[in-house]
Structure formats: structure tokens, C-alpha cells
Amino acid sequence: MTTGFLLIILGALCGGSFGLPSKFVRKETPWETLWGPFFLFATLLLPLLVGPVLVKDLFGVLGALEPAQWLGPVAFGFLWGLGSMTLGLSFALVGLSLAYAINYGVQIAFGTVVPALLFNPEVFGTAKGALLLGGAAICIAGVVVSGKAALLKEHVAGHTQAPRNLGKGIAVAVLSGVFCACYALAVGFGSDVMRQAASAPFTNSGWRASFAVTALALWGGSLSACGYCAYKLTVNRTWGTLASPGALPVYAVAFLMALLHDGAIACFGVGFPRLGALGVSVGYAIFMSLAIVTGTVNGFLAGEWRGADARAVRGIRLALAILVAGVCVLAFANAQ
């Protein structure tokens, strides 16, 4: 069990930190020059390299599936890719702290309620369903408070800072949370994939079988995320920056981000089964709470709140506490 907790904590630290290296890329670097390689590494190349190591005969498993069995994970993975792409945009628009708070808050709420509506709607007539809705409402409240903190942050000493498309950034962060929540649906529609991976002759254990679904979701996400970056590289005529003399450090940062991103997924996938019967609920609460805290702390360390109004700082801290409380309520509901 100790190993499970350590893996969940490590995964949360990775998940809340994968955007931090982007702060160390030169400001004049086009967004798509960094995020294009990141998505290529995170959603396509790393799963291709690591997937066959984690899942015995991964491609044999996938080849034995009917199209209807893998279509759900790939389709909702495509939508999750849109969420990851818009999260990257929101980092640039509103910073790490606010983007993480909004994205994770919306993602937690939608990622909990929508799968329950689709796969277990009768739960909403029970006390557990009421707790799920209450936890989701608390998370949404945390998102609202974080948005208000951002508005205060833009006001320093009675003067408005340079425009940063704050409204657009908040909208993009909310949208990213909705799309990122589709990862839960990709997993929900992956039960046939897991059964195939666990059956003879493949006989993968539970956590190994789950990575077959993860691979499909990530590859689905590569279609949308990498596709958008290719579009931006074409429209902005920035393909040449990928071969410029300064591209190597950008690739290094993108690869580090991809390792942190996929490391978070891997650590959670391996860690929660080791926590026993309440592994999903307890592991989820620890993972999401610590990831939110880590993302916010990284934003402060990156100087995003330097010189901000004290009310704004109190606001983002309050939003953080509300989001963590919401996660804990959802975890308690899942344990019922």
C-alpha cells in the first residue's frame, strides 16, 4: 500500500508540473514550435515505445478487437486531445496557476458527473448521487472563485495591467477542462479492450490491461492535438522554426514535458490498484488534490503572482482550498 501512495503522489507532482518547463522557453518561441513536439512525444511516440513494454503483446490485443470496441476510446481520446491542446493555450493566456485551477476544477466536475450519467444514471436517486453532484458543485464554485481572483490580479495599485485577453483565456481554460474530462469517457468505453487484454492468450493483469485503453486514448488525442499544431505551423508559416539553430533546447523542454505528462498517467494507473478496495476513490482524491496544489505552487514559483493585489492572492488560495474540498467530497462519494 505504501508503494501505491508513493506512486500516486509522484504522479500528482508530475501532473501538476508538466507545464512548468514551458516557462523556460524563450518568449519569442511560437506556441506551436514547443507544443507541437510535446504532443508528438506525449501522445504518439512515448505510447508507441512504452506501451508494448507495459502491455504484453499490445498490438496483438488491439488487432483482436472489433472496430466498435476501440472506436469509443479513440473518439473520446480525440476530444481529450482537444482539451490538452486548449490547456496548453490557456497556460500562455492566463498562466499556470489559473489554468490548472480552472482546468482541473472543470475536469473533475465533468469527469465525475458525465460518466455516471452515461454508465450508472440510477445513482443520482441515492445519497451517493447527491454527494457526487455536491462535490461537482463545490469544484465549479472553486473555478468561479479562481476566475474572480484572476480579475483582481489584473488590477495593481489602481491601474489595469497590459491586456492579456483574460476573458478569452478563462473561456479557453474552461473549455479545456470540459474536453479533458472526455478521458474518463475514453476509459469508460474501454471495458471491452481491457477484457481482451486480460483474456487468453494475452493474460495481462488489471493495471497492464488498462494501459491498452490508455494507448488508444492517447493515439486518439494525437489526431486532434498534433493536427491543430500542424495547422498552426502552416498558417503561421513557422515550420522552419522546428529546424532552426535554437530548436534543440525546445525539443528537450518538450520531451521533459511529455515525460512528466505521461509519467503522471502511468503512476496513477499503476498506483491506485495497490491501495486496495478504495484505491480509485482515495487515489483520485490524493492525485487531483496534490496536482492542483502543485500547479498553483509552480505558478507562484514562476513569478506569475508577483506584485499581484493581496486580495487576488487570497482569492486563488481560497479557490485552491475549495477545489481540494470538492475533490475530497467526490472521493467520499465514490467510497460509498
Image (cartoon, rainbow, N blue to C red):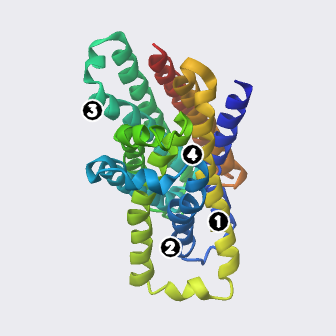
Residue denoted by label 1:
255
In this picture, residue 204 sits left or right of residue 73: right
Residue 121 point in image, percent of width and height: 26, 24
In this picture, residue 216 sits left or right of residue 300: left
Looking at the image, is mark 2 or mark 4 nearer the viewer? 4
Residue denoted by label 4:
265
Q: Quadrant of the C terminus?
A: top left
- Secondary element type, mark 4: helix
Residue denoted by label 2:
32
Q: Image height check: is 81 above or below 189? A: below
Residue 13 point in image, percent of width and height: 67, 43
Instruction: Say what amino acid the circle numbered 2 marks.
Output: Glu
Who is closer to the viewer here, 88 or 262?
Answer: 262
Who is closer to the viewer here, 272 or 236?
Answer: 272
Name the N-terminal-most of marks 2 and 4: 2
Looking at the image, is mark 1 or mark 2 nearer the viewer? 1
- Residue 315 seen from this side: no
